[in-house]
Amino acid sequence: MLVLTCPCCGAAAEETELAPGGEAHIARVGPGADAEAFEAYLFHRKNPKGVHFERWRHAHGCGKWFHAARNTVTLEVYGTYPAQTPEPPRELLDKIAARVPGFAWEGRA
Amino acid sequence: MKRYSAFAIAREAASYHEGWEKAWASPEPKARYDVIVVGAGGHGLATAYYLGKNHGVRNVAVIEKGWLGGGNTGRNTTIIRSNYLQDPSAAIFEKARSLYDGLSQDLNYNVMFSPRGCLMLAQSEHEARGWKRTAAANVLQGIDTEYVDAKRVKEIVPIINIDGPRYPVLGALWQKRGGTARHDAVAWGYARACSAMGIDIIQQCEVTAVRQKAGKVTGIETTKGAIDCGKLAIVVAGHSGVLAEMAGFRLPIESVALQALVSEPIKPVIDTVVMANTVHGYMSQSDKGELVIGGGADGFNNYTQRGSFQHVEDTIRALIETFPIISRLKMLRQWGGIVDMTGDRSPILSKTPLGNCFINCGWGTGGFKAIPGSGWAMAELVAKGEPGPLAAEFGLDRFGAGRFVDESVAAGVAH
């Protein structure tokens, strides 16, 4: 079972305690953006086979949203961090790069 | 290809059954094909079959990373039905169901289609209202379904407990012509029929890149070398995102794990398919006597082909109340498949931003039942370059246009 440590309350939360919220770091398109950009913002997803940055909510705990870096093939959890950040923390990216050959942060979607 | 028949069995018996040929050939890839279909699951093989049969396009290769039918085609709960709310879904799923009717004869391969009927339980007032609405929509679509009350459900499935208390049965949507088929046989039958038409099925061959020139696809790179093609059809379900990335576009799809399990074999207790959408559980009995049980999908992106344990627990807990008779059964096997979910829970059969490249994906948790109809519509799209009536509403452009085929609302859950 997936166990994610909630960065808000510190609890090691099991999967049943959490609600998945999909891909993280999707930049909202600005005012005046064209229809295609808005479509991509709403619907298009990276859906990677490998490292995935995603949103979770500690639904049956503190109730707060947070982010996690997880591998969709091995289910390895690299770490969790607060949702109030536009990009994953540097040390987490370094940790993933050390674990996954060829990994590079592509920036926000 | 030697035809299968009772006479053939007698003839082959004379030579101690040593003369049977392989059901399909395993050729090395040629340098170029008119059409390459990526993915030798049911949908990919059906696409190739109808390309050859309906459109006369036979210089076709079906490329498969693993072995044919080894993905979701071999991992589903084999349910076939077409009781959908939205017109475009009803049309393509009913096309598939009606093709299943004569598929064994068409392919000369016994796919063991068993139209044993499919019951979708209503276990809340909302669901009862929803199924009544679907039954009315099905009348207009010319699909044979009816809403039946709890008493009739009990007559159809004597082992069911309709009293609850957690999940009482209020009624059900009953499609008599729904049922099950042998999932492997569907893949094998299509593969054999494709091979007989001269279509190459190339297994153990993974696509590593999609080559393009001036916005059009020119071929693919594979672990067995480069292959040129006129047109490319991507039919790879859970891995659609991976192929789309190679081709240079993104999809409105996320891949999650969906799981199923079977019990130890017991004597016949249920001769129909029962689906309980409220509790994410569905059950039928295989010819071997195993109860085949499907569960809910995980909510997070997952490529592991195994699901979370609590979904098994949730499904079983609910089904035990509905079917008390199964409470002491041992479960034999559990497995998962990667399903490609779209936002509106409807499939994508579409042209793509890359010229001459077409995609068939997004069948999510309900692809098996659609195989013949999906292949039929996809073959038309690939052959003509434009979608026919069955595929027209399932284009990629529907997301931007807000023209959803919203089965996620209609079904509420996995369907």
Image (cartoon, rainbow, N blue to C red):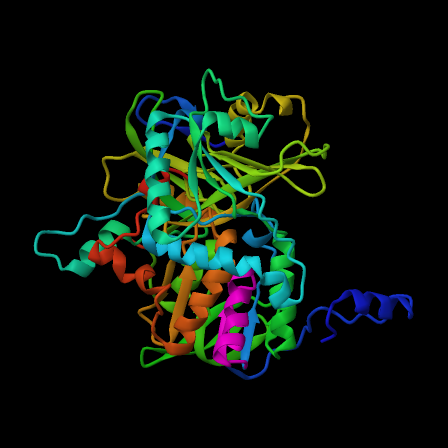
Where A71 falls versus B13 (above or below)? above
Which quadrant: the C terminus of chain B? top left
Residue A62: horizontal and vertical position, in percent?
Answer: 31, 20
As drawn, the residue found furthest toward the bottom would be B31
Q: Nearer the viewer, residue B78 or A41?
A: B78
**Within the magenta stretch, is there residue B55?**
yes
Q: Position of residue A101 (x, y in %)?
A: 48, 54
In this orientation, which residue lies closer to the viewer: B374 or A68? B374
Q: The N terminus of chain B appears in which quarter of the rendering? A: bottom right
> Where's residue B392, x and y in %?
32, 64
* Horizontal side of residue B317 vs A103, given as left or right: right
Location of residue B294 (image quadrant): top right
- For the record, the magenta segment spans B34-58
Residue B92 appears anywhere in the view: yes
Q: Quadrant of residue B157?
A: top right
Q: Quadrant of residue B268?
A: top right
**Looking at the image, is B346 positioned above or below residue B396?**
above
Residue shown at the point (48%, 52%) measured from the top left: B367
